[in-house]
Amino acid sequence: MKFGIIPPYGMAPVEAPEFAVAFARLAETYGFESLWVVEHVVMAVEYTSVYPYDPSGRSPFTAEVAQPDPLLWLSYVAAATSRIRLATGVLILPQRNPLVLAKELATLDRLSGGRLELGIGVGWVREEAEALGTCFDDRGKRADEYVAVMRTLWREPVASFAGEFVQFDRVVSRPTPAQPGGVPIVVGGHSAAAARRAGRLGDGFFPLGVSDDRLAQLRCIMTDVAQAHGRDPDAIALTLLGMADLRSAERCVQQGADRMVVAALQPDLDAVRRWLDGFQRNVMERM
């Protein structure tokens, strides 16, 4: 099983250039396969939207937590690393212009030597979507279409598209991604809709904040939808969030995970280094 890591948002200065580079290099040195960064363009100081991953309905990503743009942050640390994969966990797809995003992703994938993975979600904060001038209610349909838009631009030498939200005729977008077939798309989320999206469109599935029983249900939904669309469900890699201990890693293996992602929760680089050393010895080497 592979291991991914999330920077310590809200605890350490993830937006500081020296911290970002040092953290990414440490993660690579200690054998992590991937680095996962989050996205909120803005956070409302007051909101009525319900955060789905905590019983309180409130997000730990408060308005005071710095959340750098994920693609710019990954671009910065890509230049300071050589092996670790660069992933969004997750980028809120329906809030982006898919043509601009396709160009940004292809550029970063080229510059990083084909190390990019695009984790996508549809978002849970209505106030954020409205602040950006996007519609919250049709975000699922737009996410599906935007995936198709990007893959068309990456695949076709001269691309045309006629959808409900996006239309263009005979355009060219260069460069294309370094990875054959384009940037892998990992569908994140906790809902049946996310599982169906992963089955139809995903190169990977990243179910977030679900119980064991709910995970089994979502995997069944994903599998059924994938087979109905002529896809191999075993080719859709499963990524799971885990705790930083051996029991959690073993549980992820039992659940069929290809990758476990853990969050670093340390306030400075010295603490990060000690934590990484312990995680490598107590979990990675024993797996």
Image (tube, rainbow, N blue to C red):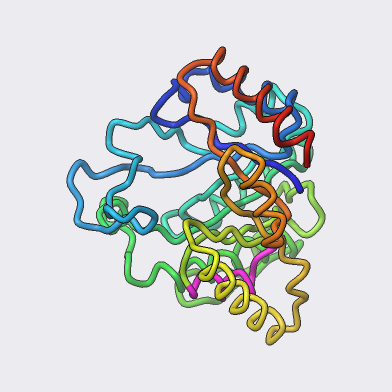
Which residue is farthest bottom?
A: 228
Figure check: 19 above or below 99: above
Which residue is farthest right?
A: 180
Q: For the image shown, how many numbered marks are present on the structure? A: 0
What percent of the width, then of the height, locates residue 133?
30, 56
Q: Is residue 131 left or right of residue 285?
A: left
Figure check: 7 above or below 274: below
Q: Residue at x 28, y 49 (%)?
A: 58
- Front residue (pair 209, 85): 209
What percent of the width, then of the height, locates residue 266?
49, 23
Q: Residue at x 25, y 54 (%)?
A: 127
Which quadrant would residue 219 be assigned to in this image?
bottom right
Which quadrant would residue 35 be assigned to in this image?
top right
- Front residue (pair 32, 22): 32
The quarter of the rendered structure image containing the C terminus is top right
Q: Residue at x 58, y 47 (%)?
A: 242
Q: Residue at x 48, y 29 (%)?
A: 265
Which residue is farthest front?
A: 247
Q: Tell me where the magenta segment starts and ends, as one range.
A: 192-203
What percent of the width, then of the height, locates residue 284?
74, 36
* Residue 98 belongs to the span the image colors magenta: no
Which quadrant would residue 26 be assigned to in this image?
top right
Q: Main secondary structure of the magenta part?
A: helix
* Residue 197 belongs to the span the image colors magenta: yes
- Front residue (pair 48, 239): 239
Query: Can residue 167 be spotted in the picture?
Result: no
Query: Can residue 2 be spotted in the picture?
Result: yes
Figure check: 30 above or below 141: above
What percent of the width, then of the height, locates residue 73?
54, 31
